[in-house]
Image: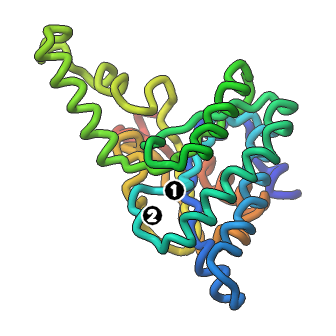
């Protein structure tokens, strides 16, 4: 029995978040420039998106570029932005044909104008799709997201739009960039690193974490199924005892 056949659909996560790490190291090990790793990181994205759609998973969030990544060499950033635009153009037809919706989170104002334009056009073009939702985290920082939410809450309180005693988790979440998107049940990180690197900090309070030593360009559907199988065999207690579940 294959890994995919072992999966129980009723026990799969509704939302999977992925830190796609290891592109640069993968390229360096092959004696190539770092952008070669990013170029080869497109295939596993296709594998994960296709597998998620087939399994009925509703949300996949991909950590594509953090605010800290702006500190990388300019030539790598320029190449990444160019790769992002070319990939969007190639994938548009596929997303539309497969009823996949695209959303973004992060500070898109820092992206080059043509990159923002292509992204916004694809988000608009897929807005009516009702299948899998793919969320790209670009120029994203979870700490910055939380600070922005707190700033908006303070502004609304000063303006008399809300009272301090009205604040609760549901209201706070409505100020986050992920408003309306369920928290991820599973977070996968590749490359053997054991941290979540400023990614969905608030949203991942009860997320199951899965780490693999595979570098992202080597990650394939079978590796994804392995992570999902590991997830469905876990007991999620949310502070309760096993006996209470």
Q: Is there a contact, CB below 8 Å, between mark 1 and mark 2?
A: yes
218 and 28: which is toward the camera: 28
Q: Which residue position holds label 2? A: 69
Residue 189 point in image, percent of width and height: 54, 62
- Colouring used for the render: rainbow
How far is mark 1 from mark 2, CA to CA?
A: 6 Å
Residue 168 point in image, percent of width and height: 24, 21
45 and 166: which is toward the camera: 45
Quadrant in the rendering for residue 83: bottom right
Could you say which disc has been placed on residue 65 in the image? 1
Quarter of the picture holding the N terminus: bottom right
Q: Residue at x 78, y 57 (%)?
A: 221
| Callout 2 crowding tier (Cα within 10 Å): few <14, some 14–19, many ≥20 | some
**Residue farthest along the front direction in this orientation:** 113
Query: Callout 1: helix, strand or loop?
Result: strand
Q: Residue at x 84, y 33 (%)?
A: 98
Could you say which disc has been placed on residue 201 in the image? none
């Amino acid at each position: 029995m294959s890994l995919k056949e072992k999966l129980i659909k009723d026990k799969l996560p509704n939302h999977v978040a992925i830190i796609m790490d290891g592109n640069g190291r993968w390229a360096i090990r092959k004696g190539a420039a770092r952008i070669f790793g990013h170029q080869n990181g497109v295939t596993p994205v296709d594998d994960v998106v296709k597998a998620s759609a087939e399994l009925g998973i509703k949300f996949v969030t991909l950590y594509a570029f953090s605010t800290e990544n702006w500190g990388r060499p300019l030539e790598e950033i320029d190449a990444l932005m160019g790769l992002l635009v070319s990939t969007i153009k190639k994938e548009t037809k596929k997303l539309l044909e497969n009823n996949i919706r695209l959303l973004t989170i992060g500070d898109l104002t820092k992206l080059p104008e043509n990159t923002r334009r292509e992204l916004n056009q694809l988000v608009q073009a897929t807005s009516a799709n009702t299948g899998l939702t793919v969320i790209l985290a670009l120029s994203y920082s979870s700490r910055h997201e939380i600070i922005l939410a707190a700033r908006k809450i303070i502004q609304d309180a000063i303006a008399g739009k809300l009272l301090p005693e009205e604040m609760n988790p549901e209201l706070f979440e409505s100020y986050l960039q992920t408003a309306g998107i369920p928290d991820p049940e599973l977070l996968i990180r590749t490359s053997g690193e054991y941290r979540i690197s400023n990614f969905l900090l608030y949203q991942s309070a009860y997320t199951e974490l899965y780490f693999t030593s595979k570098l992202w360009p080597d990650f394939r559907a079978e590796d994804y199924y392995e992570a999902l199988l590991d997830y469905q065999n876990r007991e999620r207690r949310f502070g309760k005892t096993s006996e209470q579940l």
